[in-house]
Image (cartoon, rainbow, N blue to C red):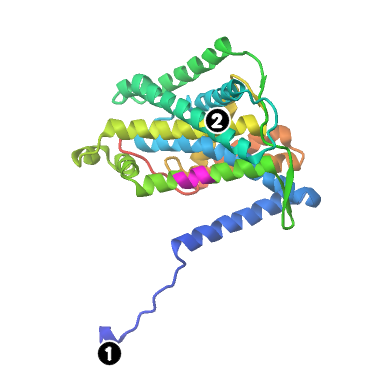
């Protein structure tokens, strides 16, 4: 018997997209079961709330993980960029003269487009400015220097809003109607559908940009090996600046979502949201954009499940206990880390 005559059976495996889709479906079903057990009649509502909160965290977490993935910096000012985005959205709404719910879908779409565009571009430029003047001079400094600088920038942004705008909770106009639509057996509020749709659309757009454009390729090559990318002609400073712009722009979009979903904002709202978003990035695998999105939704379900079981006050403890357990048994996070080489 020759080696050629021996037929070695090949193990058949599901394609990666199919496995990913099945994994997402399985986690969604598990999440629904967990939040529905305490009150089956409210299971769908709790499930939608968890998706909504998770979408908000996921948008902020993407900025954390993108910056860490390309220069290994924990940008603790990112939560404050989210906060600035909510205030920019508030200022734009008031400047346009829209302070009440808009029932005309055409007018509402146009106004929201303007608010998102101005807010995302404004905080995106702010992200570039912060990177240029606060982080770039320290790029080759010891790791502690940019970390402390990031914390300092966080406090600066907080105090600018505290002194320049308001030191208390500010009510923001809710432009989106508080209506309920029915999709088959599912009933969902328009605002929840809006938040989830915007978050998913921006995540898909980010994925397409980073995988199918030259700028996205430059960003990914910079994250993999900065020196090799520079030798191949990639403008490293430009790639890093674009990363900061995109991450900040996504946080700005989350700020707009914040104004519409909760109807309030405050100068220190970025601390808790930023902390949870950073936790989501670590939970999913720091430097991994898909992991950051997954981590955001996981934290959203943990928060809602804690409240559903009567432990709403313990939601933070539940979130961080879960993080510790995941890191003990899977130190690189749920989907693994993707980090850059240190410059």
Occupied quadrant, residue 152: top left
Task: Look at the image and say whether residue 283 sits in the magenta stretch.
Answer: no
Q: Residue at x 48, y 38 (%)?
A: 62
What segment carries the magenta color? 201-205
Toward the viewer: 143 or 124?
A: 124
The span from disc 2 to disc 1 (Cα, nearest Å) is 73 Å
Q: Residue placed farthest to the left in the image?
A: 231
Would residue 276 be visible to someone looking at this image? no
Q: Residue at x 26, y 84 (%)?
A: 4
Magenta span main SS: helix
Label 1 element class? loop
Pinpoint residue 72: horizontal percent, then vertical percent: 37, 33
Toward the viewer: 199 or 313?
A: 199
Quadrant occupied by the N terminus:
bottom left
* Residue contact between numbered discs 2 and 1, judged by CB atoms under 8 Å: no
Q: Residue at x 34, y 46 (%)?
A: 213
Of marks 2 and 1, the one in the foreground: 2
Toward the viewer: 295 or 94?
A: 94
Q: Which residue is mark 1?
A: 1
Pinpoint residue 326: horizontal percent, then vertical percent: 54, 45
Q: Is residue 326 left or right of residue 68?
A: right
Occupied quadrant, residue 68: top left
Q: Which mark is residue 115?
A: 2
Q: Is residue 104 left or right of residue 215?
A: right
Toward the viewer: 42 or 2?
A: 42
Tell me which label, 2 or 1, sits earlier in the chain: 1
267 up-or-down from 25: above or below:
above
162 up-or-down from 218: above or below:
above
Label 2 element class? helix
């Amino acid at each position: 018997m020759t080696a050629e005559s021996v037929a070695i059976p090949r193990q058949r495996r599901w394609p990666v997209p199919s496995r990913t889709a099945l994994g997402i479906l399985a986690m969604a079903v598990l999440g629904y079961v967990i939040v529905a057990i305490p009150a089956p009649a409210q299971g769908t509502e709790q499930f939608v709330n968890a998706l909504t909160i998770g979408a908000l965290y996921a948008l902020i977490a993407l900025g954390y993980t993108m910056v860490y993935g390309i220069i290994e910096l924990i940008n603790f000012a990112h939560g404050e960029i989210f906060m600035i985005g909510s205030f920019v959205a508030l200022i734009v709404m008031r400047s346009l003269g829209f302070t009440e719910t808009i029932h005309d879908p055409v007018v509402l779409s146009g106004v929201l487009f303007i608010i998102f565009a101005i807010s995302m571009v404004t905080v995106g430029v702010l992200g570039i400015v912060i990177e240029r003047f606060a982080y770039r001079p320290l790029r080759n400094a010891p790791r502690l220097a940019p970390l402390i600088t990031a914390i300092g920038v966080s406090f600066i942004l907080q105090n600018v809003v505290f002194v320049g705008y308001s030191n208390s909770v500010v009510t923001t106009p809710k432009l989106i109607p508080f209506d309920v639509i029915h999709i088959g057996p599912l009933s969902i509020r328009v605002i929840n559908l809006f938040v989830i749709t915007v978050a998913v659309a921006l995540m898909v757009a980010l994925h397409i940009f980073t995988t199918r454009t030259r700028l996205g390729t430059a960003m990914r090559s910079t994250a993999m090996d900065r020196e090799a990318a520079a030798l191949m002609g990639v403008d490293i400073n430009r790639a890093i600046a674009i990363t900061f712009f995109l991450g900040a722009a996504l946080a700005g979009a989350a700020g707009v979502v914040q104004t519409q979903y909760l109807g309030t904002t405050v100068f220190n709202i970025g601390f808790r949201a930023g902390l949870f978003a950073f936790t989501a990035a670590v939970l999913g695998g720091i430097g991994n954009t898909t992991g950051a999105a997954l981590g955001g939704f996981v934290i959203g379900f943990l928060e809602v499940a804690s409240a559903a079981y009567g432990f709403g006050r313990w939601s933070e403890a539940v979130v961080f206990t879960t993080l510790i357990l995941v890191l003990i048994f899977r130190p690189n996070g749920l989907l693994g880390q993707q980090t850059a080489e240190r410059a």
